[in-house]
Image: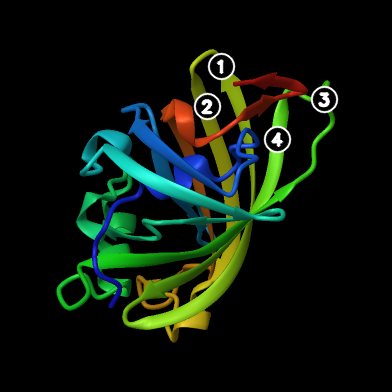
Amino acid sequence: MIMKKNILFICIILNSWIVSSQTNITVDLQKNSWIAIYGTTNVLSFKLLHNGDKIADKTVNITATQNHNRIYLSLNQLSLKVNNFDSDNKMARRDFLKLVKADSYPTLGIQLNYIETTPGIEKEAYTKGNVFVNITITGVTKPYNIPVTSTQHGEYVSINGAKKINIRDFGLEPPQEILGLIKVSEWISIQFHFVCKFTIEKDSVTLNTKGRTIQ
């Protein structure tokens, strides 16, 4: 099981400003951030939400190292407490906790391998990239490539991403209710929206913001 660090590494996924080999950054995760799991049954859809105010260590210092279009971070692991996922559909939440064996595996683990940035167009309001991660659920680890985008709003950056995965990849069986009349799909969508404030050490990097170079 991946040990807990913090979730904030993901908040510099698409920081297109980084152009030096190594950058020291302080990241402040804002409380309006969230992670959601979307699923469906043969009769309805459901949503499980993990709010940003339940994420520990909302401020962290990170060293980012860039090699060509790949970014590696000094903190690259996180875990999410499964009990922090909530839903208006209490049955869906109960089944989710049972599915991921919350008593035996209280966290979901994510390990960031690297971030691959995509060159953008100067006039674009957002930036694109891909995050290469290992996701661990109930002790089973699988690799994924998650496409992400980021948008800058003054001193804040919002990062959005989504990935559709099959729970059978982790050896899990979709639950059934009412003698099999309600069947849960094996496909779920993991989506996230992070809002972060960056403080970059002045002497560690030259910033390039959409064509403007700032020393």
- In the rendering, which numbered label is found on residue 175? none
Return the residue found at the far bottom. Answer: 171
- Sequence-wise, which precedes: disc 3 or disc 4? 3
- Sequence-wise, which precedes: disc 1 or disc 4? 4
* Front in this rendered view, residue 190 or 60: 60
Amino acid identity at mark 3: Glu
Nearest to the eye among marks 3 and 4: give it.
3
Question: Mark 4 and mark 2 in contact (Cβ < 8 Å)?
Answer: no
Residue indicated by mark 4: 127
**Residue 97 point in image, percent of width and height:** 26, 65
Residue indicated by mark 3: 122
At horizontal 71% and vertical 55% (from top left) the residue drawn is 68
Question: Mark 2 and mark 1 in contact (Cβ < 8 Å)?
Answer: yes
- Sequence-wise, which precedes: disc 2 or disc 4? 4
In the structure shown, which secondary structural element does the residue marked by tag 3 occupy? loop
Q: Is residue 145 left or right of residue 185?
A: right
Residue indicated by mark 1: 153
